[in-house]
Image (cartoon, rainbow, N blue to C red):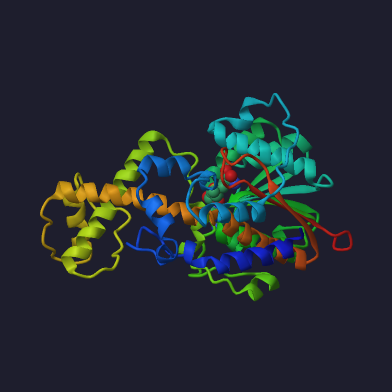
Amino acid sequence: MGLLERFNLLTDWLQRHQALWRQRPFTHLQLSWEQDWPALAQWLRQRSLADAEAAQLQPALLTDAPAPFAELAVEARALCSLPRWHGDLMQPLPELLHRHMPGRKWQQITRFSAVTSARMPASPQRWVDWCAGKGHLGRLLAWHSQCPVCCLEWDAALCDAGQQLSQQLQLPVQHLTADVMQLPLAQLQPEDAAVALHACGDLHRQLIEQVVAAGCAQLALSPCCYNRISAPQHQPISNAGRQAGLQLSRDELGLPLQQTATAGARERRQRDRSMAWRLACDLWQREARGIDAYLPTPSKPPGPPENLQQFCQAVANHHQLTLAAPPCWDALEQRGWRRLAEVRNLELVAGLFRRPLELWLVIERALYLQEAGYSVSLGEFCEAELTPRNLLLLATASPDQV
Ligand SMILES: C[S@@+](CC[C@H](N)C(=O)[O-])C[C@H]1O[C@@H](n2cnc3c(N)ncnc32)[C@H](O)[C@@H]1O
């Protein structure tokens, strides 16, 4: 299936089912789709927090959920099937190439580099590593290809640390301290191959536009954090994207990221407690104010609070409200935990739309490159357990462009 055809199918599917993914159970006590699918809502609401946790990475595996869950899961899977790309992982590599790097990050980098090197049609004259951090990816590419690399990164300390490592390995890597959002166009050259691993929203949009403007020969991009944009709404850049008319708020752009492959047990417990308190506080403020509407809680209430009562007080102070205490704080906390289980289970429905929405966003960018004459392919550079952000967009300029 071509990119445009898949994009149109995704647009239609996402629009048709938008009631199932736009509303967030966290901020709504009842979701509008629950009236249409009461058996599914009831089934999800009686499950435990542990049940939800077990299913959150792959909600599609809940085959015994009432309709329309399984049907939507099958449709989502069909719309999102992509090739899993592989490349030769060169071993052994010098320890300096992965010094100070967590194992998971290093595996992502080795796979990204192996797939990119295997699938890029020709060795570039220069690699440009976009938002490179210490330039681990750029250094590995330089090691494999012996081609020069330019790492762009705005944090001078990361550039210095990266430059030292590159020098120790005697690799032709230059670390430039630069804000890529203010980059002079001349930084990118037509002979360059630009690479970016996990570049956030505005940063990857800027990269794609700069690649097209400079006419770079090749691009390998794995995007991330689609909601890190300065605009309040998603801004399509392709003609097809503009025509699709799918409006996405910054909050909705966060949906593909609501999936945690990496949180440890302690981190999860802390996150759950914070969420249960927020939900308990939400119940309290609705009942005490007599207004059935969500009030945002500050992401880091001052304190930090030691119990639910202190937490609720901090939220009330933040909104300059004086609210009557609930009959029993412990009972309120229990209701918060129960609501958390319901929220997490109801979120599994929107979870079916995470990957389709992510793919829609990435294809929208891919179509911009295609409209500019690039040949574009999409695949997965590693398994989702290593990082759920495993999409890789490869683009090559057509011969008459270069
Ligand atoms: C998510 S990290 C990715 C780093 C690296 N590519 C990796 O995968 O390890 C994003 C990097 O972009 C850098 N960054 C953020 N905004 C930038 C900007 N406007 N110009 C240059 N670098 C930026 C950050 O300092 C950070 O090192």
Q: Position of residue 239 (x, y in %)?
A: 69, 73
Q: Residue furthest right?
A: 400
**Closest to the observer, 172 or 192:** 192
Q: How many marks?
A: 0
Q: Position of residue 325 (x, y in %)?
A: 11, 57
- The answer to whether residue 139 of the structure is visible from this angle is no
Residue name at image x 19 percent, y 45 percent: 307
Q: Quadrant of residue 318?
A: bottom left
Q: In the rendered view, tell whether residue 222 sits above or below residue 103.
A: below
- The answer to whether residue 298 of the structure is visible from this angle is yes
**Closest to the observer, 172 or 137:** 137
Residue name at image x 32 percent, y 50 percent: 340
In screen coordinates, is 366 left or right of 355? Answer: right
For the C terminus, the quadrant is bottom right
Q: Position of residue 28 (x, y in %)?
A: 35, 63
**Closest to the observer, 2 or 250:** 2
Residue name at image x 55 percent, y 31 percent: 103
Q: In the rendered view, tell whether residue 185 sits above or below residue 85.
A: below
Q: In the rendered view, tell whether residue 246 sits above or below residue 333.
A: below
Q: Position of residue 302 (x, y in %)?
A: 24, 53
In screen coordinates, is 146 left or right of 244? Answer: right
